[in-house]
Image (tube, rainbow, N blue to C red):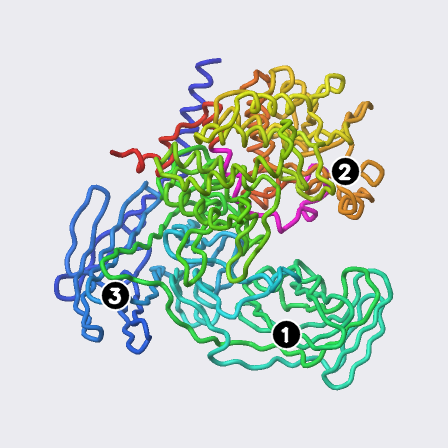
Amino acid sequence: MRLESLLLGFCLLIFSSIGYSQNLDFEIKGDRETGYFVQILDGTDELIGNQGEFNLQLSNLDRSVSFKIENWKAASYENTVKGFILKKAQYLKDFDSNLYSEVEYEKVSPSLIKKTLRISQNSIPNFYYSVDFTNIPAFTPQKYVSFEYGNFEGGMVHELYPSAGFITNEDEVVGFLTNPGYQNNFTRTTRRRFSGRGGGMVGMRILPDANLLSTATPKEQDNGKHYIKYTYGEALNLDHGESSELPIPDLFSKTGNLKLKQKDSLIEMTFPKGEKAGIEFLSGMKPQKIYSISFSAKGDMPLALKLYNYKNGVEGSELEHGIKYIDGFPLEKDSWQEFKASVMVPYTEAEDVKMFIGRTNGLSGSLNIKNLKIQEHEPYRFDYNRLPMGDTIEKVTYVFMRPWKDQKDFKVSSQVKLAEGMGFEGTEVEKMLYANFQMMTWITSIDDEKPFNVPNLNYSPDMYNRDSFWSVISTYNKELNVSIWNQWAATQTPEGAIGTIITPYMGSVEAKDNEATIEWLVWGLLNKRRFGVELPQEKIQLAADYILNEFDENRDGKCASHFSMSQVDVMEYHPKTERMAANQGMFAVALKAIQALGLEIEEDYVKKAEEEYRNFYDKDRKHLLFDSNYPDLISVTDLVPEFLSLWVFEKPMLTNEMVQNHLDQIPALNKVENSVHPEIGTTAPIIVRLTNDEKGYTYMDENYQPFGEFGSNNYGDNSRDGFYYNGGSWLRAEYTAYAVGYWHGWKPAKKRMENRLWAEKNLNPNWPYSKEFIPTKWESYDEWWPSTKGLSWNVFILMANEFVGNRKPEMDPDFRKENKY
C-alpha cells in the first residue's frame, strides 16, 4: 500500500509538471540609440509585444504645465539574479526638473513574472501624475477573460477582483494582476453615504480609478487593436467635460398598487399600505459608460430608487457601482429635495438597465417627482497621484500564464498568483484569502493616501472597525496595522469610545457600547508586541476607563450593554442586557488587555469577569447560552472570546468539558461526497436552535425569536432559514471556534477545519473565493446572496492556523521583512 501511494504520487507529479510546463521568460530589446525595453516570451516565442515599458502623464500642482512620456525606454540596463533592471535619468525642460525611472523584471516562478516601476524626482516640491502599463498581445487573442466573465467583450473592467487575461491560440490564458491599492495608490470607491447616513449609498461626482483595469473595446478589437491595461492615478470629474441627456419615457409603467398621475415632468404617486410599488422603465443606460441621475422630489414618506440589470425581458441583479440600498431617501412634505448621483455601469452581459422609483417600505403616503434626468458623461480626466520631491514611488504588476481550463480555475489562479507574487507562502486557500484581503485594501481617497480596508465591495465605501480588526491583524504588515489602528484611534470620543465605522467623503458619529473599543485595545497590544510601537497612553487609559464605566459601572464583574459584542449585531437592548455569553467573554478579554497594557486593575476583578463568562455554561444543556432568555440557542461566536484569551494571553477561560460539549452540539451541514471528509458536513450555522428530536436543531422563527422586530420581519416566515444570522455559516467565527476546540482536545476539530476551508472554495463552484457567509439551507446557487462575495475578514484563518500549528509567521512576507535584521 505504501509503494502504491508513492507510485501514485510520482505519477501525479509527472503529469502536474506536464500540465504546468509553461515557461514565461523575458529578453532585452532595443539598443543604446533607441532605448531598451523588455518583451515577455512564452519559452522563445514572443508573447507580449510591447515597444516600451509605461506611459507617464505629469503635471505641476496648479495643472498649468503638463507633459507625457509615451512608451518609456531605458538608457541602460543591468542583470540581476532573477531578471533585469532598466534605468533612465532624464531632464524635463517643461518643469525644469530631473526624473529618475527604473523598471525591474523578476521571474518569480516559471509561470509568473513581476514588474516593478520606480520613479523619483528631486527638483520640484510635488507632481501630479498618472501612469499606465499597456500590455499588447503579440498576436490576436482568441478572446478576453476577466475575473467574473469567461468571455469578456472588452472595455472597463470594474469587478469583484481586478484581474483580466487573454487566451492564446494554444489555449493558454495569460493573466494580469496588480499589487493592492495601498501600495499601488488606487482606490475602488465609487459611492458615498448621504448626509446623516440616511437613504443608502449615492454615486460620487469625482470617480477615482474608474479605469484601473481595461481591455481593448469591441470597436478597437474590430480595428485590430488589442491590449490589457492598468491605469493608476486617474480620476474622472463628472461635473466637467461633456454630457448628453437620455430620453425619458412620456408614460411610465406601474408596478405594484398605486395611483399614478403625470403632467409634463411632474410625476405624482399615491400609495396604500402594501408591497413594493412605483414606476419602472428601461433607462437606456448601457454597459461601459458613466451616467448621472437627477430629479427633485417631495412627499410624506421616504423614496426608494433602484437600478437592475435587464436582459431578455428578465430583471436581474441590482447594480453595485453607484446608487445602492436607496430604500429611504428622506423627503419633506412641502419642499422639494434635490437628488443627484453618478452611476458607473460596468460590463454585465445585460442589455439595459431598468430603473425603479417608488416605495419599498410598505407605508401609505405620496411621492412627487419632477425634472427627472439621466445624463451620459464624457467626463474630464485628471491625474491625482502625487510624486513628492525626494520620494520614490513604486507600482507593481504581474503577468502569469497557465492552461485555460475554465472560469473557476482563472478565478482561483488570479488569487493564488497574486499571493505568490507578493511573496506569501501557504496552502491554496490561504493564498486565496490573503489575495482577497489585499484587493479589499486601498487608499482612503484621492486626497488621502492612508490605507483603508473595506469588508467587501457591497459594504464599500465603509471601513468597519470590527471587520478591519480581524482583517489587518492577520498580516504582519506594520504599515497597515499601525496606520489603520491610528485611524481608529482618531475616532475616539471624549468619553473614550472608539467609533464603529469610518466612511470616506462623509462623516460618522457612530460610537457605541459594542466590542469596537475592546478590539482596538487588543489591537494596540498586538502592535506593541509585534512592532514595538509606542502607544498613546492617554487614549489607551481613556478607552480602558470607558470600558469599565460603560460595561460594568457597579464593578460586579458582569457585563451590561445595549449591543451584542459578537458579530451577531442585529438587536439593540433597552435597558442594557447582561444576557449574552459573548458579551461577558469579550468584557473579560478587555480586562486582560487592560492588565497586559500595564494599567492598574485588580486581579480578583479579572477573575470575577472570567467566572461570569463560565457561568453562561448550562450544565444540563451542555453548552454556553448565547442569550440566557433563549437557552436553546447555540452559537459558535460564544467561543470567540476564548480564542482571543488563548491566542493573545495564552490562558483559557473555559474548561475542556465546556468547549467539547458546546462544539459537539454544533451541527455539521452541507454534506458533500467529494469534500475532504465526506462523512461529515462542510459548514455549521453561526447560530441555531437546538431541539430534542432526531434532527437535533431548527432555525429561528416568529415564536422563538431573540432579535425582536428585525427577527420577526426577516426570519418569522422561515423563508430565510439558513441565511445570514438565521443559521448562515460564517467562516471566521466558525473556524476560530474549531481552533478553540483543537486546543481543548476536541477530536473532530481538524476535520471540521479542513472541510470548512474546502467549502469556501468549492461548495459553490461559481464562487471560489471568500464569502460573508454560506447558506446552510438552500436549493440552488441562485439563492446565494451576491452581496456576500469577497469578504475580507476571513483572512483571519491565517492566525487560527498559526495557533493550531498549521502555519508559521515566516510564511508571511511582511514578517520576514520586519524581522530581516
Q: Taking 20 as reference, is 488 left or right? A: right
Residue at the image point whose x is 26% and y is 63% from the top: 52
Is residue 648 inside the magenta stretch?
A: no
Foreground: 472 or 763?
472
Foreground: 605 or 382?
605
Depicted 640 relative to depicted 516: above or below: above
Is residue 790 inside the magenta stretch?
A: yes
Residue matched to label 2:
706
Q: Taking 813 as reference, is 679 left or right? A: right
Q: Upstream in the sequence, badge 3 or badge 1? A: 3
* Neighbour tally class for label 1: few under 14, some 14-19, many 20 plus, Cα within 10 Å: some
Q: Position of residue 566 (x, y in %)?
A: 62, 37
Question: Do we see residue 533 in this rendering?
Answer: yes
Q: Position of residue 571 (x, y in %)?
A: 71, 43
Residue matched to label 3:
125
Q: Taking 689 as reference, is 243 left or right? A: left
| Magenta part of the chain | 775-798
Q: Upstream in the sequence, badge 2 or badge 1? A: 1
